[in-house]
Image: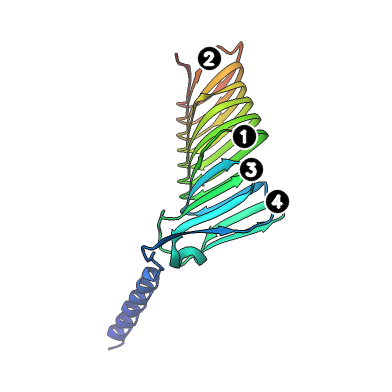
Amino acid sequence: MKPKITFAILFLAILGLSACKKICVKGSGNVVTKERVLTHFKELDMSGAFKLELTQDSVQKVEIITDDNLQDYVKTTVNGDRLVIKSEKNLCATKNVLIRIHVNELSKIEASGAVDVKTTNEFKQPSFELKSSGATESDLMMNVNTLSTRISGAGKIALRGQAAELNIKISGAGKIKAFDLVANKCVVDVSGAADSEVNVLSELNVSASGASKVSYKGAPAKVVENSSGASSVKKVE
């Protein structure tokens, strides 16, 4: 009898855990827009499954567009100069959360999870840094002196505009498409199955390992290449 009792208890425990995992809050279908009144910020830290639209503007504004019953599950907190946006753990997996941010200057974004980031206009500012992990995707238009991007995981970044200096670091299966961003100087550090496309005017410095790939446009006068494994660095027209 003891083996049967033990099996029954184990079965009920597994069933209970499965039931707990399925308990999450779904959207009502009634989508509303609510503005969050927040103090000034220059950095952004996001984790969860969101769509983010960024607009450079003289007036700061943050709007959350989602189902009325999910609004309170999207948390926004300003710590110093950093706006932290995250979802509650019991929010069902969804990308039906759109966040619109108007800001004068945004110097840094850290995104993890399944965040989609897109700029609606060109951001003109001294510098910008983007760090992404997980399955994040970004489409950015920038006009900056220094642009730094870092991907860990399977993230994707598309870049347009111009930068005096572009710094790229990718580990994992990340991909950066930057043929539409003209950089005077570019430093690329890729490993794993990373894929990077850049457009360089004067100087390119590449460190590639694993099965990573770097493709570049332009006619840089100086190209420094340090590649190993099955990695490749090639010029394209």
Q: Earlier in the sequence, mark 2 or mark 3?
A: 3
Q: Earlier in the sequence, mark 4 or mark 2?
A: 4
Q: Mark 1 — residue?
A: 148
Q: Earlier in the sequence, mark 1 or mark 2?
A: 1
Q: CA distance from mark 2 to mark 3?
A: 28 Å
Q: Report the residue at 67% width, 50% height from top.
A: 41
| 192 relative to 3, above or below | above
Mark 2 surroundings: few (<14), some (14-19) or many (≥20) residues within 10 A: some
Q: Report the residue at 62% width, 38% height from top.
A: 129
Q: Mark 4 — residue?
A: 81
Q: Mark 2 — residue?
A: 218
State which mark lies toward you, 4 or 1: 4
- Cβ atoms at labels 1 and 2 below 8 Å apart: no
Q: Nearer the viewer, residue 13 or 31?
A: 31
Amino acid on which disc 3 is placed: Lys
Q: CA distance from mark 1 to mark 2?
A: 20 Å
Amino acid on which disc 1 is placed: Ser
Q: Nearer the viewer, residue 37 or 207?
A: 37
Amino acid on which disc 2 is placed: Gly
Point out residue 175 in the picture as x, y percentages from the top left corner.
Answer: 47, 34
Q: Identify the secondary structure beneath mark 1.
A: strand
Q: Identify the secondary structure beneath mark 3.
A: strand
Point out residue 44 in the picture as x, y percentages from the top left corner.
Answer: 61, 49
Assign the C terminus to one quadrant of the image. Answer: top left
Q: CA distance from mark 1 to mark 3?
A: 9 Å
Left or right of residue 27, residue 204 in this image: right
Q: Mark 3 — residue?
A: 108
Name, please, the residue furthest toward the front.
Answer: 59
